[in-house]
Amino acid sequence: MTEAVKINRGLKGIYFERSGVSDIDGAAGTLQYRGYSIHDLATHATFEEVCHLLMRGELPTAAELDAFDTEMRSHRAVPDAVLEIIRTCKDGHPMDVLRTCVSALAALDPGSQQVGEEAFQRNGLKLTAQVPTLIAAHEAIRNGREPVTPDNSLSHAANWLWMLKGEKPSEDAARLADVDFVLHAEHGANASSFAARVTVGTEANLHGAIVTALSTLAGPAHGGAAEDVMKMVKEIGTPDKAADYVKAKRKNREAVTGFGHRVYRAEDPRARHMREGVRKLGEEMGAPEWYEILQAVVEAMKPYSRHGLNVNVDFYSGVIYQLHGIPMDLYVPIFAIGRMPGWVIQCLEQQRGNILIRPLTLYNGPEPRDWVPIEDR
Ligand SMILES: CC(=O)SCCNC(=O)CCNC(=O)[C@H](O)C(C)(C)COP(=O)(O)OP(=O)(O)OC[C@H]1O[C@@H](n2cnc3c(N)ncnc32)[C@H](O)[C@@H]1OP(=O)(O)O
Ligand SMILES: O=C([O-])CC(=O)C(=O)O
């Protein structure tokens, strides 16, 4: 049975389900959340509005937003038992610590075991609120400080920066973090959302699915790219070295991180907002060289762009975090803050018409053979 079966390695180009959330046109380089252009959302919407749009299905009215946001803010604190776990594994990678904490939250909350629309909505909102608190608490504890208590008078993005740094962020800094979260909020059947759907397909609960998603996001081919871009920029050092760096990478047929995407063949529409953010912030902070190095890499990659190889959303985000003085190992966790509502809605969609996700692998191992006793092998 090895002939005549078409294998789609990596499930490239395969539709496995319908979804009413993200509409991505990879050839045109466009992205919409529930019909709203990512450019309009990045320009006008707050992350809280986008969470409502994704999880509840529509942009909220002022009253709906108020109720939704009040509920989300009420969930920000995490149990002391989880802070104890963070103290115990404070030297671990922030993604490992975050994943462990989400598991612990499940074990400490009997409501996490429930499945179905109401439970997923409730637990989705809770986890969306708690994830920034967990990351910031770990950052404080590993630096010998006490975690900063969430400030419920602040927006999701401003409160994140407050908890991370222990000082109130400027309006511009909070808005930049807000836009970053909006841009990362949802992206169809990306690897981590797909993995979360596989978990929900077995009728497992949302906390379990988010643990799956966090594990999957961590890899450098997915959420780890921003950190690798920052390492690349540091390695290149000055704009005039970018061309040699790219040439050497391509000569060895190695990927240049921050480029390429499974779906986009035009530039990732989210990249332009991050590019503008790096340029402005770099100028304001008297550190324009990072932007210049990134642009020199883009220039040097042009000869290799024949397949529509372009920058993706994470080509610019790492440098923004660097300019904010955020440690590199927090870049993937920051992606997770933004992606929470996307994971939640993908899990909700999955459980609404649930079906076990279970594709096939085509066997290509040995022919049937006789059992060999251990002493004869
Ligand atoms: C938020 C996100 O998850 S976005 C992705 C973040 N990841 C990265 O930035 C890591 C670097 N990029 C990559 O590794 C890849 O582009 C992936 C994994 C994201 C997508 O890979 P795939 O969809 O499998 O693309 P595929 O590997 O088929 O690439 C198509 C062609 O573009 C080339 N290509 C793809 N990405 C890159 C890259 N980053 N640098 C150089 N060439 C690349 C491939 O070599 C291939 O060329 P070929 O046809 O001559 O062999
Ligand atoms: O969609 C993908 O394959 C990767 C992803 O999560 C994104 O681009 O936001």
Image (tube, helix red, strand yellow):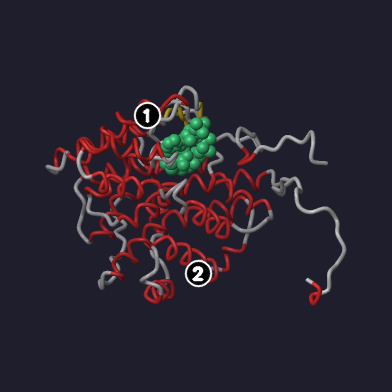
Task: Please rate how many residues cluster around mark 2, counting C-alpha atoms within 10 Å: few if below 14, some from 14 to 19, many from 20.
Answer: some
Q: Which mark is residue 350?
A: none
| Residue located beneath label 2 in the image | 104
Residue 177 found in image quarter: top left
Which residue is at the front of the view, 195 or 168? 195
The residue singled out by tag 1 in the image is 39
Image quadrant where residue 39 sits: top left
Image quadrant occupied by the C terminus: bottom right
Quarter of the image containing the N terminus?
A: top right
- Residue drawn at (83%, 74%), measured in percent from left and top? 373
Along the horizontal axis of the image, is 127 left or right of 231?
A: right
**Where is residue 116 shown, x and y percent of the image?**
64, 53
- Which amino acid, mark 2? Ala
Q: Residue furthest top?
A: 28
Q: Residues within 10 Å of mark 1 (few under 14, many from 20)?
A: some
Res. 340 visible in picture = yes
CA separation, marks 1 and 2?
37 Å
Provide the secondary structure element on which disc 2 rests.
helix
**Residue 6, placed above or below residue 177:** above
Task: Please tell me which residue is depicted at 43% across the width and 28% down the height of the picture.
Answer: 37
Q: Position of residue 115 (x, y in %)?
A: 63, 57
In this orientation, which residue lies closer to the viewer: 12 or 113?
Answer: 12
Residue located at (56% from left, 44% from top): 346
- Name which residue type carries label 1: His
Question: Residue at 48% of width from left, 30% of height from top?
Answer: 264
Does the residue at mark 1 contact the one at mark 2 (Cβ under 8 Å)? Answer: no
Provide residue 355's location: percent of width, then percent of height.
Answer: 72, 46
Position of 118 compared to 371: left or right?
left
Question: Can residue 33 be seen at all in this image of the molecule?
Answer: no
